[in-house]
Image: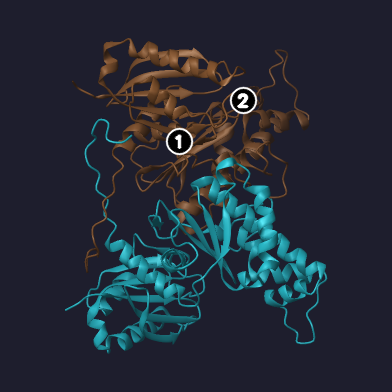
Chain colours: A brown, B cyan
Amino acid sequence: MHTDLVAALDIGGTKIAGALVDGGGNIRLRARRPTPAQDDGETVMGAVAAVLAELSESPLWARASAIGIGSAGPVDASAGTVSPVNVPGWRDFPLVARVREATGGLPAELVGDGVAMTAAEHWQGAARGFGNALCMVVSTGVGGGLVLGGRLHTGPTGNAGHIGHISVDLDGDPCPCGGRGCVERIASGPNIARRALENGWRPGPDGDASAAAVARAARAGDPVASASYERAAQALAAGIAATATLVEIEIAVIGGGVAGAGEVLFAPLRRALRDYAALSFVRRLTVAPALTGTDAGLVGAAAAATAAATRTCVTPPVVAGGRA
Amino acid sequence: MHTDLVAALDIGGTKIAGALVDGGGNIRLRARRPTPAQDDGETVMGAVAAVLAELSESPLWARASAIGIGSAGPVDASAGTVSPVNVPGWRDFPLVARVREATGGLPAELVGDGVAMTAAEHWQGAARGFGNALCMVVSTGVGGGLVLGGRLHTGPTGNAGHIGHISVDLDGDPCPCGGRGCVERIASGPNIARRALENGWRPGPDGDASAAAVARAARAGDPVASASYERAAQALAAGIAATATLVEIEIAVIGGGVAGAGEVLFAPLRRALRDYAALSFVRRLTVAPALTGTDAGLVGAAAAATAAATRTCVTPPVVAGGRA
C-alpha cells in the first residue's frame, strides 16, 4: 500500500475544512462543515469528526500517512490542545488526541493557522526558495509564521510568528489580547476601517464601511482613506523590520483580505520599511503579496505534517577543523 | 596531537582580547591589546595580529582546532566581513580571511558580540538548559542573541538577536541607526541618564551623571531617577515580549552595566512584561540577570566556533508515519 498522501484539517471560526493532499501539494479530496462556533466543545468536535468521516469513506484515505492540523489560535502543540479565541467551547481542548482517535492513530501535527499559511507559502508560494521568511495574513486579525534556516519555525507550542501581537507602540491603544499598541490593533482590516471613520471618511451609497471600501476610496484619491492605510503600513513595516532585525529574514509575504488593497497598502509599506529596517543586514529585505489562496490552510497543514515527519537533526561529535 | 582547545577573539571598540578556551569553558591563556579604534584599518588589524602572535607563542597554541571571532557589529558572517560602528577604519573589512591568514588557516567562525555573549550564557550562564532564550547586553548600547530549538540562532549574516534596534515606539525619537523608537534609544545607559537629566535629576557632588549614578539615586528614593529606569524597563519589556511572541522564548537573560542596577531595573521590568507578554504561550516567560562576566565575549566566541563545527543537520527522506 502506498502512503503517498497526507490528510489535512483547517479549523477556523467559520468553517472546518479537510483534505487529502499529495506530494505535489495538490488537493485530491475535500470535505467541509460550518464551524458550530457558539456550541459546546463536543458539538464542535462532532463537526471535525464528520469531516474526517467523509474523507475516510474514500479509497484514497488508506494512502494517508499522517494528518496535519492547522487551527485558529492560540494552540499548544506541546500539549496537543487548542483554545481558539472565536470558539469558546474549546479551551485547552485535546484536539490532537481526539483527531488521532478519530483517524485510527494517524501521526498528527498541530500548528497555528499562521504557521500553516507560512508552510504553504514556503512550499508553493512567494516564500518558495527563501531560507528565512516571515509570512503574514492581514485580515480580520493579523497572524503569521516564520521560516528560519530553510525550515518552518513553529516554536515549542506551535505559535511562533504571532506578529499581530507584538507592540510597535508601547504607549498605544489597549489591544484585546491584553497588550498595547499591537500590530493588529493598528493594521487589521477592522482597525483600518475604524480609523478612517474616526477621521471623517464616510462610506458611499452602498453603505460598505469595510477596509476594502476604504481601499477603493483611497484609490479614488480620498486622503483620509489613504492615511488610514498608510498608518497600517507603518505598523506592519515596524513589525516586519523588528522580525528581520531579530531573526534575519529575507522576505516578508503578506496575504489576507487587507493585502487585496494592493498598492494602496504595498506602496506605503515599502516606503515605511526603509524607515524601520535601517541596519545593514536588513536593508535588502523585500515584501511580496502571498500567492497561495484559500487552500493555504489545508496545503500548509499537510506541509507541516510532512516537515514534522522529516524533522530529524543529527549532531556528530566535535571534530577538529570540521568546518572552515 | 590533541586539538582540544579553541582560540577566541573578542573585538570591541576599546580592547581586542584573545584566548585559548578548553572544552569546559575555562580560559587557558589570554592576550590583550587596546583597540586603536580611530586609526586606519591596517593598524587595527595589526593589534589583532599582535594578540594572535602572543597566543601562538605558547605551546598550547598547537592544540587549537578552530577560532571563534566575536566582533562589535554589524558583522557579515556570510561574507566574513565586519563594519563595527565604533571602528571607522573597518568597513566591510575581511576579518575572517585576515584571521585565517594570521593563524595558518584555522577554521574561523564570525559572530556579532551579542551572539557571542548569548553562546556563553547558554553554555555556562543563566540560559543554560533552556531550549529557547534571548540574551541581552544593556550598557552603552543594547545588543543580544537568540537560542532557538536548543541551538544558537546566528542568522545568515551572524546578526540575529539585534533587539536594541527593533522599534517599540513607531512615532518615537530618531535613533542613530536610522530607525525610530528603537529599544536602545530608550533603554541604553546613556539614554537612561539623558532622560533623568532632562526631567530634572541632578548628579551629586561627585558629578557622576552616569546611568549607575541614576540607579543609586533611584535606590535612595529619587522619583525622577526611578521613572527613567521604569521607562527603560518598559521598552525592554516590549522588546522582550515581541521576541517571545515571534519566536517563543522561555527566558530573557540580561547582562551589561545597566543590568547592574538590579531591582531598580528588574522589578519594573517584571511588572511591564505582564503588560506586553499577554498571549497564553508567552505568559510563562521569565527574566534573569546574566551570570557570565567580562569573559563572556571570549567564552562565547569559542562556543560559537564549537557549535559551527558540529552544525550538521541530516534530513532523511520522508517516511510514512515517521513521527507521532
Q: CA distance from mark 1 to mark 2?
A: 22 Å
Give how far across and how far down residue B64 sits, in percent. 26, 77
| Chain of the residue under label 2 | A
The quarter of the displayed image where residue B43 is located: bottom left
Q: Earlier in the sequence, mark 1 or mark 2?
A: 2
Residue at the extreme left of the image, as rendered? B1
Note whether residue A283 is visible: no
User: Residue flagged by tag 2: what amino acid is it?
Assistant: Pro
Give how far across and how far down residue A321 sits, in percent. 22, 68
Residue at the spot 47% in from the left edge and 67% down from the top edge? B125
Q: Are marks 1 and 2 on the same chain?
A: yes
In-front residue for pair B186/B22 = B22
The disc label shown at residue A267, or none? none
Left or right side of A153 for B269? right
Left or right side of A45 for A65? left
Residue at the spot 50% in from the left edge and 81% down from the top edge? B14
Q: In the rendered image of this protein, does residue A93 appear above or below residue B312?
A: above
In-front residue for pair A200/B263 = B263
Front label number (1 vs 2):
2
Mark 2 neighbour density, 10 Å: few (under 14) some (14–19) many (20 or more) = some
Q: Secondary structure at mark 2?
A: loop
Report the residue marked by disc 1: A115
Q: Secondary structure at mark 1?
A: helix
Report the residue marked by disc 2: A88
User: Residue flagged by tag 1: what amino acid is it?
Assistant: Val
| Chain of the residue under label 1 | A
* Image quadrant where one finds the C terminus of chain A: bottom left
Count the labels in the image.
2
Q: In the rendered image of this protein, does residue B105 appear above or below residue A295?
A: below
Note whether residue B27 is visible: yes
Mark 1 neighbour density, 10 Å: few (under 14) some (14–19) many (20 or more) = many
